[in-house]
Image (cartoon, helix red, strand yellow):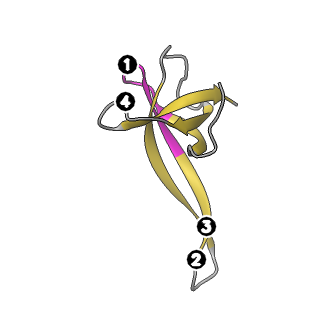
Amino acid sequence: MSTDTNKKTLKGTVVSDAMDKTVVVEVGRFVKHPKYKKFYTISKKYHAHDEKNQYKIGDDVEIIETKPISKKKSFIVVYND
C-alpha cells in the first residue's frame, strides 16, 4: 500500500477489539512541559478500520488517515509491527 505524504501516520497499541471491523488504537506522545521542563506522556485514542478483524489487544500497529468511514473512524490499520 502506498502512503501519501499529506496523510497522517501514527503508531500505537490496540486497546480494544470488541467492535466488528474496528479497533481502538492508543497513541502516546512524549512532550516537554514548557515551564517546568519535565517530560510526560500524552495519549489519545483513535478508532481505526480493521477489515479482517486480525488485530487483537496489545498489538503494536500503524494507522494512516483516510476519508471518513463512519462518524468516529477516519483511520485504517496499515500493518502490524
Q: Amino acid at mark 4?
A: Ile
Q: Is residue 54 left or right of residue 70?
A: right
Asked which secondary structure carries label 1, the reply is loop
Which residue is depicted at the point 42% across and 20% down? 21
Q: Position of residue 41 (x, y in %)?
A: 57, 61
Quadrant occupied by the N terminus = top right
Query: Residue 17 location in percent, x, y?
Result: 44, 26
Quote the CA–CA distance across marks 3 and 1.
Answer: 33 Å
- Packing grade of label 3 (10 A; few <14, some 14-19, many >=20) is few
Amino acid at pointer 2? His
Q: Which residue is mark 2?
A: 33
Q: Nearer the viewer, residue 15 or 11?
A: 11
Q: Secondary structure at mark 2?
A: loop
Q: Which segment did they paint magenta?
A: 15-26
* Mark in the foreground, 1 or 4: 4
Amino acid type at image mark 1: Asp
Would you name the residue on which mark 3 appears? 31
Task: Using a 10 Å C-alpha cutoff, classify the residue at mark 1 as few (fewer than 14 neighbours), some (14 to 19) or many (20 or more).
Answer: few
Query: Where in the figure is residue 59, as x and y percent of width and height?
Result: 60, 30
State if disc 1 and disc 3 touch (CB < 8 Å): no
Q: Nearer the viewer, mark 3 or mark 4?
A: 4
Give the alpha-carbon distance from disc 2 to disc 4, as whole Å.
35 Å
Any mark on residue 69, and which? Answer: 4
Q: Residue at x 58, y 46 (%)?
A: 6
Give the mark nearest the N terminus, 2 or 4. 2
The residue depicted at 33 percent of the width and 38 percent of the height is: 72
Q: Give the label on residue 20, or none.
A: 1
* Whole-number angstrom distance, CA of label 3 to CA of label 4: 30 Å
- For the residues labelled 2 and 1, the Cα–Cα distance comes to 38 Å
- Answer whether labels 3 and 2 touch (C-beta < 8 Å): yes
